[in-house]
Image (tube, rainbow, N blue to C red):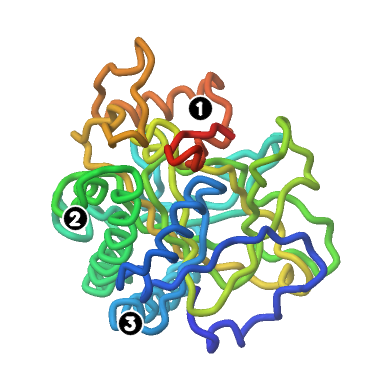
């Protein structure tokens, strides 16, 4: 999340709400290949697929925090525009997921309208991989700012993915190579705004529970509201099962997506999460957040990877090859048609047994 100066602008996160316990990892230690920190990353990747990443203490991390704050400032300005102005750049799912989504365009589980607006920037558009899209002038006038965000966020996540490579028995650089900056993909930067509620109002869901379809996500937020479903919760979950994520200054929240589960054969986890009413006094303020959502290059194979004795071979019928573009379309269609109910995926743990590593399914 951005620095303490940004947090000081908002009411504090309350101490009396259920919070999920997430590992907070040091980016500096991971860059230095600290073995203990790397082990913690892999454990978190299997347990919930979520962890906090402290970006203080390194030039790359400090630069990422500055880019995050610049994105926050521009997001606030973008969402100040009149609704009708932004509707000119409306997204049109499932064919086009870039552009503006207004409050109420999506429905919650009970059929009521959502309370989240966002503008999604295409990485390919901002970096010039495709013909330019039509965006509001404020975005066009700050292309270089967003280009810097994409470049730095990609670098940070590529550093993290080398640790997953090593733990999964893959050649270093394998996972990052599936989402290069210069190849067409669905990777995006999403600038989100959740509406405030009156202090003391009844808690409700602002954005429906889901997993991320891509490979990995980096989120920056200040005000609470994001909730995670703990791994040991039965299906269907009760509303009381969800746990808040406490925003922490100088940290990004990292989570793995469905594509990573696909490649790893279920070793790592893509966990259900949602956005709910912010807790305590924070419910009375607007909630801004910035999410870098990484997806594979369109022609990347989604076949299960071969990774030593960590990633097991698929069963008959599971090894059909499909590219990321077709896989994402298939997944989106299944969700829209109700064939694939959103749920947490993956989460196999490695355990030591008589000197041999084996998979323990959880």
Q: Of label 2 and label 3, which has the lower sequence position?
A: 3
Tell which circle, 3 or 1, labels the residue nearer the N-terminal end: 3
Mark count:
3
Residue that sits furthest to the front in the current view? 354
Q: Is residue 198 left or right of residue 74?
A: right
**Secondary structure beneath disc 1?**
helix
- Image location of residue 359, percent across then percent down: 47, 34
Q: CA distance from mark 2 to mark 3?
A: 23 Å
Mark 2 is surrounded, within 10 Å at the Cα level, by few (under 14), some (14 to 19) or many (20 or more) other residues, namely some
Residue labelled with disc 1: 335
- When the figure is inspected, residue 176 is found, relative to residue 191, above or below; the finding is above
Residue 6 screen position, x and y as percent: 54, 84
The residue singled out by tag 3 in the image is 58
Observer-nearest of 78 and 16: 16
Residue occupying image coordinates x 72% and y 31%: 236
**C-alpha separation, residue under disc 3 versus residue under disc 1:** 41 Å
- How many residues crowd mark 3 within 10 Å: few (<14), some (14–19), many (20+)? some
Examine the rendering and report whether any part of residue 137 can be seen.
no
Q: Position of residue 7 (x, y in %)?
A: 59, 82
Secondary structure found at label 3: loop
The residue shown at (48%, 73%) is 251
């Amino acid at each position: 999340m951005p620095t303490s100066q940004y947090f000081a602008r908002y009411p504090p996160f309350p101490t009396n709400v259920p919070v999920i316990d997430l590992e907070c990892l040091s980016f500096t230690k991971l860059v230095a290949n600290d073995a203990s920190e790397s082990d913690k990353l892999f454990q978190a990747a299997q347990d919930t697929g979520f962890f906090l990443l402290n970006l203080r203490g390194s030039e790359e991390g400090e630069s990422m925090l500055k880019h995050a704050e610049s994105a926050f400032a521009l997001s606030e300005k973008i969402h100040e525009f009149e609704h009708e102005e932004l509707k000119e750049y409306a997204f049109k799912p499932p064919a086009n997921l870039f552009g503006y989504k207004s409050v109420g365009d999506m429905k919650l589980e009970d059929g009521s309208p959502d309370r989240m607006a966002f503008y999604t920037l295409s990485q390919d558009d901002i970096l010039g991989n495709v013909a330019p899209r039509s965006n509001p002038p404020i975005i066009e006038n700050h292309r270089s700012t967003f280009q810097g965000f994409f470049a730095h966020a990609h670098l940070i996540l590529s550093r993290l993915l080398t640790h997953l490579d090593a733990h999964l028995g893959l050649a270093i650089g394998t996972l990052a190579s599936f989402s290069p900056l210069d190849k067409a993909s669905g990777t995006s930067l999403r600038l989100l705004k959740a509406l405030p509620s009156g202090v003391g109002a009844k808690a409700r869901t602002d954005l429906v529970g889901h997993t991320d379809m891509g490979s990995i996500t980096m989120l920056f937020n200040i005000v609470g509201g994001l909730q995670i479903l703990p791994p040991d919760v039965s299906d269907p979950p009760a509303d009381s099962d969800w746990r808040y994520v406490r925003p922490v200054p100088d940290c990004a929240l990292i989570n793995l997506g469905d594509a990573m589960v696909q490649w790893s054969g279920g070793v790592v986890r893509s966990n259900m999460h949602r956005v709910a009413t912010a807790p305590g006094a924070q419910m009375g303020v607007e909630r801004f957040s910035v999410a870098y959502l990484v997806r594979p290059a369109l022609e990347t194979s989604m076949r299960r990877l071969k990774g030593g004795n960590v990633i097991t071979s698929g069963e008959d019928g599971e090894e059909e090859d499909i590219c990321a573009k077709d896989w994402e379309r298939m997944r989106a269609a299944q969700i829209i048609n109700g064939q694939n109910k959103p749920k947490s995926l993956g989460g196999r743990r490695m355990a030591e047994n008589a000197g041999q590593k084996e998979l323990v399914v959880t």
